[in-house]
Amino acid sequence: MARKIRLAGRFGIGFAGAVSISRPVVASYCTTFLKPEMLHIYRQVCGLVRWRTFVVTRERAGAERFPFDDIEELPPARQPLARRFWLKFVARVPPLHYRGELEQLTALFARRPADLVHVYFGHTGVHLRDFLCAWPGPSVVSFHGADVMLREHRPKYAAHMRALFSLVPLVLARSRSLGDRLVAVGCPPEKIRLNRTGIPLDEFPFVSRSAPSDGAWRLVQACRLIEKKGLRTALQAFARFRAHFPRATLTVAGEGPMRSELAALASVPELAGSVSFPGFLGPDDLRSLYAGSHIFLHPSETTGKQDQEGVPNSMLEAMATGLPVAATLHGGIPEAVTDGESGILVQEKSPEVLADALVRIASSPGLLQAMGGSASHAVRDEFEQSRAIAALERIYDEATALGKPRLKGTR
């Protein structure tokens, strides 16, 4: 049985429809559903147990890789040219208005009510802030890494971010380090909740490994080929590692704007065809790559624009299979990797020190197995899928109980 409600927002906008009295409903808003690197979002959306969801998106992508039935794809917004010009250049209203998106979302949520809106990525929340203000229900926004950065070319962005924080009862961060950065840009600390990435452990079973008797160590890094992944450092460290183990190889799985640059760096004589770039791998190929490797490499670094990681998904998957990690003291990595137990962590942009860490793992009897076992246990204890989903649903419960914050000047 369902009941009808009608509510009015700040702009006199009506929201009406049937609300289920059984499982609560969260509308999951993601501008593109989904890019290849957004597997963690797919796992969250598909993994809900006590809550139901439908997805709202402006672009449906990756349908074969990420099948999902209940999607509301918003058509390209259309405003009469004269009105769009007036709104954009004369009234100077935000894009949500002059693109016609506010009306689209209003109509959608009148037709499809929800108990909560979950906006994926902070910059998307900033873009939607007028809708979130108009919509009478509570919403949450989750931050994943780069989206905590302020936009220096947009002087009002910091104020808009703070306005977003005032509109939501809770803000989700993928790591404690991201939570600290959210506080630094103006988020009240009492609103922040940890939203761990969940890893389906049955898809990444533990593999027992032994050191290669012929010195043919197989290293792997899986990530988007972008600056903050520390890929230049990885190649420099690997070149030094090969001075000790000349039969070693490195596989860098992923796609991104640095592909050509990295291929050029890997063509130097010191690396002599030892580095491969297979591109973005599907789940089966990625699992095979992890199973056949000895060490996972991930020397993330903070960019000049202050872009940093949460907790890398690929690192957690690799750890689940028993791969020890050689990485950096960066972002949320130390929240998953204990230095000296499940891997070795070094300072950012330190290829010599990173190479020493790799040599230490490869040269110490029993260290490979010990660190691999600890890595697998760490993921099982802190990042297991069902536990992460249960924690997320408790956040949804809390947000709906808190309700939409009362803004200053309203009754």
Image (tube, rainbow, N blue to C red):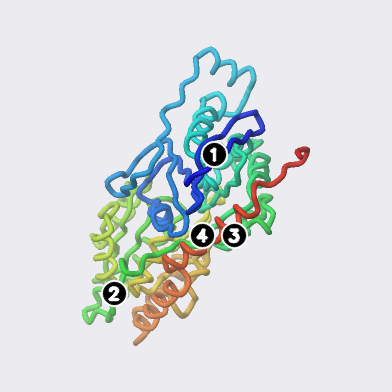
State which tag comes first along the sequence, 1 or 3.
1
Which residue has dot 4 on it? Answer: 392
Real-space Cα distance between discs 1 and 3?
A: 32 Å
Circle 4 packing at 10 Å, graded few (<14), some (14-19), many (20+), is: many
Kindly identify which numbered label has been placed on residue 4.
Answer: 1
Real-space Cα distance between discs 4 and 2?
A: 44 Å
Which residue has dot 3 on it? Answer: 193
Q: Nearer the viewer, mark 3 or mark 2?
A: 3
Real-space Cα distance between discs 2 and 1?
A: 69 Å
Q: Give the amino acid type for the residue marked by disc 3 in the picture.
A: Arg
Circle 2 packing at 10 Å, graded few (<14), some (14-19), many (20+), is: some
State which tag comes first along the sequence, 4 or 3.
3
Q: Are marks 4 and 1 in contact (CB under 8 Å)?
A: no
State which tag comes first along the sequence, 4 or 1.
1
State which tag comes first along the sequence, 3 or 2.
3
Drawn side of residue 216 relative to residue 262, left or right: left
Which percent across, then down, holds residue 229? 43, 56
Residue at 68% over, 40% down: 159
Q: Nearer the viewer, mark 4 or mark 2?
A: 4
Label 1's element?
strand
Check the image and report above or below for 267 versus 61.
below
